[in-house]
């Protein structure tokens, strides 16, 4: 005698080729059982849905869609011969089918119940970080009177007792970021609901579902209008507990429309009916926050988390009448973030620390942890958390601590760095260097740091180490040679900003340095340092046209070393043809200045002027220095013409310089020189 079928999986589908395979694959362990059948009703698919379905079951039936969900659901049930009926949709997937398999084997346990409840995770974003949790009755003992009713949101006429299980179904049918899907579902559902409300305008459930549909569609004002109507209908209801979903939709619709006082009132009323409704605390807390009622917001968020921590024992969450929107980790993280900020503001650092575990945003978590531990003087917890963290988390913590340090007094900064020196690894050693007053110990630690760690990563944190090496430029240059041009410039820029001593010492170094022409890396490093120093000075003095000969001498060396650099980096014959195609503007500048140098050797002042104009155009940031550089070239040529007795041309060149320069000292020098030449002409005449 054949054994009776235990489970009938009943589905109705239409144009579900995108979802169906995922759903049916999750059922495979059940479909391999002899006592399980899969029944699929297709209501008019025009895609590959039917062919996909037939790969998993032979029981595929076609029935024309009749605009009645319950009617179609009941048709699928009519084919079922199993002892139990399992209702599933194509856009769903069983998350933990092993729990269901174990339950099916426990015949004694099943015999005591008529209905099984599972939990549906309705995902609302495609990255699956946010979901709405809803207890759902999906397994029913197959009896002749079991059926569904309700044209739109079909409801099962189930029998008690109900077994609450840990079976979880993932639902992908309401992904808010899938605009096509959401528009399709809104159009279909709202049309049916409006039609039913025309027949029965006082139907609270349909009114609520229409408000919910408007909300999901982003039409918050229409949602608020409909849910207000549903709320007014509650006046005639004695027990409102089973209709609390009206309060949830009312609260979020009012909040979306910035009706915060109205939200607060409806949440408070709902919580008087049941103090276990997590979502109402969520809306209530944020409404208080929007109205800047910080104390009330803090207390409400703390109540929210008490329910989150007790969710396993919260019977309210097992009621299949309610969808729970804000029990997921994304919602908890959002509440935790605001609660932590409120607690820090109230200087309740120990309390704030307790909510860090709920945060998903790593950058904010690092910032909050740093502030809580620093202000609460809890460096033991900071060390424990930091030492076990991954690289990116450590980086965020360091960034937060470095920002915090800027607002510290000298005494607070020393205390902070002393505690940070206890951390493991690179950052701990770095702070040991910072706090060391013993030069010998500091020197040893710097050597250890440079030997053990690369400076190429996290330069924004560790560039300060060069401030402790200013008396040893050979070591600085040695370390710079390991870095790329961008990183060298970043460090020099930061050191100029951070240290008064660095500026004078770098000027001395650059003034004294004259690397060999063939020393590629020293020329490269020097032009990087010079570039930042020169641009910094030009920016600070551009309005005053301040002539500091030391900087103009550095510029001369910068050009000289830049020419050395590009001669080692490129072939000269290539540069002649292609220098304008170089992506690096600084390399273009050096190439042009190489041609200027050649033109000077040929006494071709016209080409010098041509290239000068091109150089200013290519690298306008150095125009401050290029102008003086050109003046010196003109003066150089004027001197040569004087030696040759070509006084008129010499005078023209010097007068050109006199007209170009705005510097009073240069102007005075030129006037004296011109007077001298004019006197020489008179004598010779």
Image (spheres, rainbow, N blue to C red):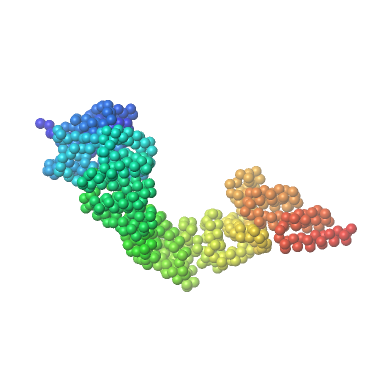
Is 638 positioned to the left or the right of 228 in the image? right
Q: Is residue 117 visible from the viewing direction of this image?
A: yes
| Residue at the spot 71% in from the left edge and 58% down from the top edge | 662
Question: Which quadrant holds residue 18?
Answer: top left
419 and 370: which one is in front?
370
| Residue that protrudes farthest toward the right in the picture | 685
44 and 639: which one is in front?
44
Is 137 positioned to the left or the right of 620 in the image? left
Establish if 156 lies above or below 367: above
List x then y, in percent, for residue 46: 33, 27
| Residue at the spot 67% in from the left edge and 59% down from the top edge | 545
List x then y, in percent, for residue 456: 48, 56
List x then y, in percent, for residue 391: 40, 56
Is 523 positioned to the left or the right of 444 in the image? right
189 and 578: which one is in front?
189
Establish if 502 lies above or below 636: below
| Residue at the spot 48% in from the left edge and 61% down from the top edge | 462
Q: Is residue 166 visible from the viewing direction of this image?
A: no
User: In the rendered view of the protein, which quadrant contains the N terminus?
Assistant: top left
Establish if 615 lies above or below 676: above
| Residue that protrudes farthest toward the left in the picture | 1
User: In the rendered view of the protein, which quadrant contains the C terminus?
Assistant: bottom right
| Residue at the spot 55% in from the left edge and 60% down from the top edge | 492
């Amino acid at each position: 005698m054949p054994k009776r079928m235990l489970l009938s999986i009943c589905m109705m589908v239409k144009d579900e080729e995108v979802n169906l395979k995922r759903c049916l694959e999750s059922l495979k362990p059940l479909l391999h059982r002899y006592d399980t059948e899969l029944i699929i009703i297709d209501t008019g698919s025009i895609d590959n849905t039917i062919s996909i379905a037939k790969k998993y079951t032979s029981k595929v039936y076609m029935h024309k869609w009749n605009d009645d969900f319950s009617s179609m659901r009941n048709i699928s049930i009519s084919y079922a011969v199993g002892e139990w009926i399992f209702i599933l949709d194509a856009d769903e997937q069983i998350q933990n089918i092993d729990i269901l398999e174990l339950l099916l084997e426990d015949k004694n346990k099943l015999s005591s119940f008529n209905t099984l409840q599972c939990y549906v995770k309705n995902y609302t974003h495609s990255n699956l970080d946010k979901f709405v949790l809803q207890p759902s009755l999906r397994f029913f003992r197959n009896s002749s009177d079991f059926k569904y009713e309700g044209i739109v949101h079909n409801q099962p006429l189930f029998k008690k007792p109900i077994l609450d299980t840990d079976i979880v179904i993932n639902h992908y049918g309401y992904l808010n970021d899938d605009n096509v899907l959401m528009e399709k579902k809104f159009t279909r559902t709202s049309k049916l609901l409006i039609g039913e409300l025309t027949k029965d305008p006082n139907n609270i459930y349909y009114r609520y579902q229409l408000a919910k549909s408007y909300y999901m569609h982003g039409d918050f004002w229409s949602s608020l209008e409909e849910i207000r109507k549903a709320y007014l209908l509650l006046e005639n209801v004695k027990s409102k507990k089973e209709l609390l979903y009206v309060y949830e939709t009312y609260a979020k619709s009012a909040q979306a429309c910035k009706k915060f006082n109205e939200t607060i009132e409806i949440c408070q009323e709902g919580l008087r009916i049941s103090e276990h409704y997590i979502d109402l605390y969520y809306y209530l807390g944020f409404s208080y926050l929007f109205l800047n009622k910080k104390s009330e917001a803090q207390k409400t968020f703390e109540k929210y988390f008490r329910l989150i921590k007790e969710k396993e024992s919260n019977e309210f969450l097992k009621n299949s009448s309610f969808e729970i929107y804000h029990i997921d980790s994304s919602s908890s993280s959002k509440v935790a973030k605001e609660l932590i900020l409120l607690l820090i503001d109230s200087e309740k650092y120990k309390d704030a620390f307790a909510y860090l575990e709920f945060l998903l945003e790593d950058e904010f978590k690092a910032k909050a942890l740093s502030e809580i531990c620093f202000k609460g003087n809890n460096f033991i917890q900071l060390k424990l958390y930091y030492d076990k963290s991954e690289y990116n988390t450590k980086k965020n913590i360091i960034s937060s601590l470095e920002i915090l340090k800027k607002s510290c007094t000298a005494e607070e900064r020393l205390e902070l760095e002393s505690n940070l020196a206890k951390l493991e690894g690179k950052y701990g050693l770095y702070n040991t260097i910072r706090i060391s007053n013993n030069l010998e110990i500091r020197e040893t630690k710097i050597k250890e740091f440079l030997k053990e760690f690369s400076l190429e990563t996290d330069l924004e944190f560790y560039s300060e180490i060069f401030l402790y090496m200013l008396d040893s430029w050979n070591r600085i240059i040695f370390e710079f040679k390991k870095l790329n041009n961008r990183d060298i410039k970043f460090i020099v820029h930061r050191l100029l900003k951070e240290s008064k001593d660095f500026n004078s010492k770098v000027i001395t170094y650059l003034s004294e340095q004259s690397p060999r022409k063939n020393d590629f890396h020293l020329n490269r490093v020097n032009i990087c340092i010079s570039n930042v120093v020169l641009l910094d000075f030009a920016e600070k003095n551009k309005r005053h046209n301040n002539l500091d000969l030391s900087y103009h001498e550095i510029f001369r060396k910068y050009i000289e070393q830049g020419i050395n650099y590009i001669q080692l980096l490129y072939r000269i014959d290539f540069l002649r043809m292609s220098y304008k195609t170089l992506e690096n503007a600084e390399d273009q500048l050096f190439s042009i200045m190489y041609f200027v140098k050649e033109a000077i050797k040929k006494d071709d002042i016209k080409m010098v002027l041509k290239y000068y104009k091109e150089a200013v155009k290519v690298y306008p940031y150095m125009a401050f220095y290029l102008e003086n550089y050109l003046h010196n070239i003109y003066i150089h040529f004027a001197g040569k013409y004087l030696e040759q007795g070509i006084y008129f041309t010499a005078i023209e060149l010097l007068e050109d310089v006199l007209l170009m320069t705005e510097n009073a000292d240069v102007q005075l020098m030129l006037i004296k020189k011109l007077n001298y030449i004019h006197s020489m002409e008179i004598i010779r005449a």
